[in-house]
Amino acid sequence: MASGDAEALEGSSGFSSDSESEGESSLLEGEDDDDDEPEEVYSDLSEDELDEAEGAELPESGQGPGPGPGDEAKLPPDLQKHVKFLRGMSSILVNKLSKAECASLLHDSVESEFFVIDGDSLMVQHALNNDLYEGQNLHFFYLVEGFLFDITQKGAKYVIVFFKDAESMWLGNSYLLSLRSALILHLKKNTEIPVYTEFTNCFSLRWQAFVQENYPYFILISDEAFKLAGNKGMSSYLMKIFIFHTLGNKINVAMTSGMYSDIRRVYGYYINSKMVFTRCKKIHKDLESVHQAIVSFLSRNRTNGLIPGDDQNGLSVAKEVQQDIAQLQRLWPDGLDIRSSVCVVSCSVALKCLMHMLKCKENHNEAETENAKTMDEILTFQEAADLCRIYCAHVAILIHLPLVKRAQNKINVKWVKPVSDFLQLQYASQHFVLKTLEVTQEWRGDMVHLCDLNDTILLARVALCSGMVNNTESGFQFGEVIEEEYKKLWQTLSSLTPDYDLGKAFPLQATSKMMVQEDEILLAEGALEIIPEVGLIPVNIAMVEEYAGNILKDYPTLSSDSSLVTALSESKEFDNLVDWCPDKALTDDYERTRSSAFGEKSNDPWVRKRMLRNYQKLVRFHRFYGSTLEGNITKNIITNVQGAITVAPKSASAISGKSKKIPPKKKADLIAEENTRKKKEKEDVKQREQWSLISKSIMKMIQENFDQGIKKLDEFLKKCSGDSVKLIAEMDVLENSFKIWVEHCQMTDSTKKNNVIAGRVMKRIHTILDKYEKQMDKSQLKQIAGYLKELGFNKLAQTLPEIEQKAARSKVSKKEDKFVVGVDPVRFQLQFMGPYLLRDERNDPDPRITHFIPDTWQRELLDAVDNNESAVIVAPTSSGKTYASYYCMEKVLRDSDDGVLVYVAPTKALVNQVVATVYNRFSKTLPDGMVVCGVLTRDYRQDALNCQILITVPQCLEMLMLTAQRQSWVKKLKYVIFDEVHCIGQEIGAEVWEHLLVMIRCPFLALSATIGKPESLAHWLQTVKNYWQQIEKTVENPVKVGGKKKQQTRQPRDQKSFKVKLVIYRERYNDLEKYTCSSDGSGIEFVSYHPCASLTASHIEKYGFPSDLSLSPPESLRLYDTMAEVWTSWTRAQELNPEEYKHFKDKIVIKKSDVRKYEAELKDELVNWITSGHSDQVAKVLTKLKPRNVVNSPATMVKNFPMLVEALQKSRQLPALFFSFSVSLVERLAKETFQHVTNKEQIKRGSDDAKKRLEVENKLRKLSKRAGKKQPSDPKESQVSDNMVMKETEQEMLHQKLAELRRIPPDCTYAVESAADRKILDTIFQRLQQAKTANQLRFYLERGIGYHHPSLNSKGRQAVEMLFRLGFARVVTATGTLALGINMPCKTVVFLDDSVSLDALQYRQMSGRAGRRGFDVIGNVIFYCVPLPKVQRLLKASVPQLRGQFPLSISLVLRLMMLAAKSDDKMDAEAKALSLLQHSMLCYDKEKKQITLKLYFTFCLQFLLKERFLDLNGVPQGFAGLVTHLHQHEPANFIFVSFLVKGLFHKICIPTDQAARKAGAARFPEEVMESLLLILANIFGRKYLPSCSTERDSTTFHQSKVFLDDLPEEFAEAVNEYNRSIQEIFGCFFLSASKHADMLEECQLPLSRTSFGGVRSPRESNSEFTTQLNGLQKHPTTAVSPFVCLSGITNLDLFKTNNVDSISLRTIDVLSSNIPLLCLTKYDKHGRKMPLNAYVIDFYRHGSLKPLLNDNMLHLGEAYNVLNEFQLTLSSISTSFKELCDN
């Protein structure tokens, strides 16, 4: 392809421009922040936006946050000038935040990720909780700790940061200010979370250094602040400035609003910094001054006029606090409870402040005192003392009243004005007290209960009671303990204020001042005022009794004559508005899956012929595709007569152990042996002659390209049958290799020797001694000894047998020294021969495997398959674990013609690869209608149920397993293979893997390269198999019932094994060496990265070394050298010296296993250093191993990428895979590389090259035209013939010339033409031409460049895969699609950039592609633009441990009941259902969780009964079939059916339908179609946008509506009715489950484990006040957390709320995500509405993807997926309607 074609292809890609959000290109062409770099940034922030941020006009009043035009004049002048800037910045930020993607913030391997939580955002998030009553400190701390505990349990690593300037946001409210101080101190003192408070703001240099050093995964920030009066929205601007600054500094942001979680993960809206801003210095320079102006304004806006200043005439609050704390320590030297301390000091300081103000009022007139108020607005001192008594009493109650006794109703009271002012003063004093305690080193008090300083409702209750007439000591009964505590507090307070007369402790209120005013209007509690009683509908279902019978007996059931049970017993008439048949059986999902055209039967012979031709074409392609994976290895399988693979039996003597006398050989045997010997001698002579013929060419090749020459040698050795010829060949190659070393030494200075060449000599010596030492004669041993001596390894030479030992010469001549390597032999082998060290490989062949010798662990797998055992296999990528799968397939094919093996792959791409492999491997003649291989995915099937090997995805196999009419096929299963079984821990669909593993009866193989602690997985699966073993025994020996056996009999099954074998193999065949990439403008440099450099001493101490962190031999040597250098007095230094190490000493052949032992000892020694108190030395070692700082800018990634590829080519590191998670970046880099090589070619060829090529093409065209004309008849035929020959010759010469002109220079392409036959390449390129969107890719691939991502069509992906495997294409950029099982091994893997998706699991999957066994001696992993802190976390993170998902849903329960009811084999169906219910991984070895799961199942069943999907015998009825067809969309499936049952769709359609019928219309009018789509989109197409997206200017939406309208009123009411039914069902569930909660744990804060259970004293049992307090409860609180009861939450709220996570009992472990509610309106944490995306309606209207990307804020892949999913749903609904409706 000519270089000019690159320009023609500019912008022609179908994927690059719109494949991701428009801002993604900001990464692609940006520059670093260095001022001297040219401005070439493609920033997502346009110049117009930059100008807008600096000088934006003010919007109209009421638009957006911040002050309106009227408020602007009230702002100080230094802030007024920044308002326009803030408006513009806020507008830009809203546009960017609206495009935030909802993603999982925590991954399974989250140990690799570190993030920062903004402490003030954390406080905002929970202070705005709807259930929190203001002033309930303990409830607030429970919410905060609950959130932190949740993410900590999920493995999060984080720190919390409180900026000093952020304190100004809370100055408008003294209570919140003190709450913030208490939160900081509590997190520091009572939890292990790192809390940082030393940073002034996000602009401080210390913060910048912290971020640069730690490189957080993201920062969790709120996009809105707490709204406080007087700050005029400026607090929210502080948050926005923080977000803006964070994104501008290339740090990602996650928003606290819109966060939610399930049992495994936390989700939130995530903004990738590289998609937003890469260079915003123009704004950032102004941000800091704006930030300072806002902080200054908020600081001047003080909380309360009562707080005096610190001038010389005023009172220093801070000084008073310090004095009181010092006095308190003298009064109580042993310390006080923190609640008591804060109480008395804050009351003391508040009283002193008040007294100071009162004196000021008396001494000065009002004009002279800024803070003075009228006497009516300020409490008198005695009134303030009364309030302090009340406050002290409330604290005494907090200290001694158990948490469960403190539950209270919400009260609607209002503190009178002067009282509320004094309380603000007291809270402000609390703030100063806590700030002082934070820095007080000598404080000896207990700080455990910092979280419980205030209880506003309790305080108000005490105030109300104190206002009664009789509140004297005798009349106010607190109980003895509380009363004593109160008196102690009051006495201490009096001691702190000796200058004032506070009076006695009682009465609580000595004055008549009204403190609170109680509102008689109670808070509205909603329509449901009475808590429903738990009463279960009795059922007659044996499976339910067996599963949950043991707990159901503890709960009441409804009587058979109750109205509900009676109504359920009666059949319900359905209003047949059209001829619905709701009980009609529906086709299953299998029948609805699109079938291949050649899978359908036809009577038309022409159609059958076409189908056969298409089928043959498909098979040919599969075999062709499979041949690129493994070569042509098709094997014809013949079924065994006896149905089993025969194994040669052992002889009787071998079994008995007795030896018998061997009889003499017969004459015929002797003659046969002699003939064999002669034949072998002839063969040896022939092979020696062959070697003598080809040896010269091989030697020449070795001199030119050593690796290629050795490859040719290996090919010859494989053909040799005798070791004698092999030894001769090896000795000749050794001699030649040594000659190369000699020539190198003679031509090179001794200081510049390349010891790698000497390493090749040693490699040949290793191979010879390892394989042929017994066949070697004395002369050959002598020859090797000579080489060793020449290399300087005299000691090693003396270890050879039969070599004369001579004393070492004292002096060595310079001539003899010429060839010495100058390194000790062991160190030489470790440093220069690491990749070549011999592995411990078995030499004994296995008769089951013909083409290679399997390792021991592989033989274990084969044994497991032969014995019909299950196995969990954990082995690195490319280690050969998949071979067991194909051996298992062959076994099933040989055993019978009807046995079925199912191969479960996680993706369709992997399905296609396995299908091709099966077609390429196996061929078998089967009965008519049967085939070897079939495919089943959600959108395609081919021969799925008439094949012996089915390749499918998990969801489709689950569908077959749970469908009653497919059970006869299920019984044919002989084996199931789960590839990439670690997907059981993925975000979506993980529970399906779990269901399959527990439901299959047959053996299985579970394969993965990345499972942490696989032992737990194997143990769990063994319990499942034990269950099935028990079931088999029950079937074989049925239990007698009433003296008779059960009538159902069972045919004997095939012999099975129920053992689950765990096979773990950790060793990679090839080592991986890691590099970071540095590009400083002068070129690309690869800097070696030692794996131990990623560790820290604390990490090793806490976690040890990661199990898969292995070192190559040079890395082990470097680790030893560094250890010896750092600690010179290290006692084991000599012992672990490589030359003295026990497994290395005097060994000519050091093996890889020896090095692994050495590596393990070094690691153990580092751990010993730490345990023996030498962590400092370990830290120094690890620091020395760290690479120097690399110079690399993400902004110049695209510009430098072609240079990176060239550098890899020069260092022979191709083929390479380049990974990024951005589709547009993947395509862009491929394009840049292509343009680079075409431009290079254009320069090389010169300007006249194109003219020459055009001339030749024109000549050829003319010749072709002449040749095409018909020749006239001429008698002179010979002359005509000569002319034709001349023309043909000329044409051939021109073709050769054109080919020469078109030939691409070798340095202008990465393609290797010789890698594959031209015919094969033409086949691949011809197939690629048929793909409309792959034209550009075809040109790239011709140059050996490709890209691979999910949006690329299958033909394009397959072409890239095949050409890369063949070795033709050597540069492929790819997304994570290649990480999951796709076979594309390479020499080098490059990680291009950082991403949300790049976690430790993805890193291991991707890096595992490097180092092709049989091709590369070592694999390379290069980090290009990945920050060093991220690299460290990727390397040191442990492999994730698999954890269970919540296994049940209402739809799944219905599917199980349908399976049990409709299956012909009831026992088998019930066994499957019970296995799924009883063996959840989540509940494994957790009895309490199993009880919760049984209750959950029971109440799911109650819902199905009440809604008439099941009858009392468990038989499905009504629309149960339709519900199960839509089970992926729960709860939308149930709501959709309720719309049908209520006839709501009919009301919309029937009037227009009748009119349409009269008019003969084929479809509904547009208005009706849009109404139907609106309804379906609201329930099946729900995709939320961030709440801030509603603040966007609607004029920016060009073609889409963007926000989805609400449901019509009748439909919305139907949804609400459904929700009420669900709330009632699951409210009763929580009431029932509360009996099994752990109340001791429930009374502890989740994270700090602070207990509030309390030990009730007998003396307080008759407390009149506490009894009165408990009697105020209207509803019980047994099923909600005792912490939330402090805000008046009761059991009733479980029946009213849409989100129970924050109020339910934690130990029940059931979340809102497990309750199938459909909230019509969703709000974020700040109470803002989150709109639904109208992508369905918008796409229906304009039919274009581009507006969905730009307006609807979807990515290309996401848009395709959601539209495809919605289309599949509509198709399923449509098919069901056709089957249900007779008309």
Image: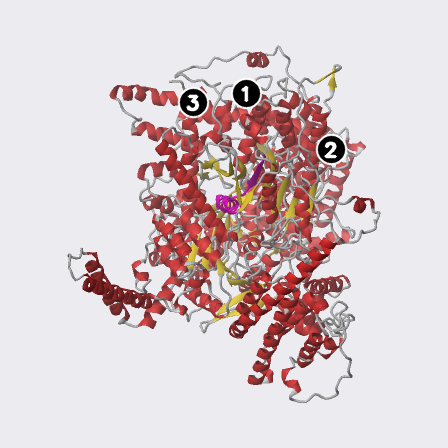
The span picked out in magenta is: 899-921
Residue at 54% over, 56% down: 1409
Measuring from the top left, give residue 61's x and y in whole percent: 35, 45
| Vertical comparison of 466 with 1181: above or below | above
Marks 3 and 2, the one that precedes in the sequence: 2
Dot 1 and dot 2 residues touching (CB under 8 Å): no
Q: Which mark is residue 1516?
A: 1
Number of numbered labels in the structure image: 3
Is 1280 on the left or on the right of 478, as rendered?
Answer: left
How is this picture coloured? secondary structure
**Disc on res. 252:** none
Q: In the picture provided, is 1599 more to the left or to the right than 1140?
A: left
The one of 1571 and 491 positioned closer to us in this rendering: 1571
Pointer 1 or 2: first along the chain: 2
The part of the image, by quadrant, that contains residue 1443 is top right
**Mark 1 residue element:** loop
Q: Is residue 907 magenta?
A: yes
Identify residue type, mark 1.
Pro
- The residue positioned 66% from the left and 85% from the top of the image is 817
Residue 1164, image x, y percentages: 74, 62
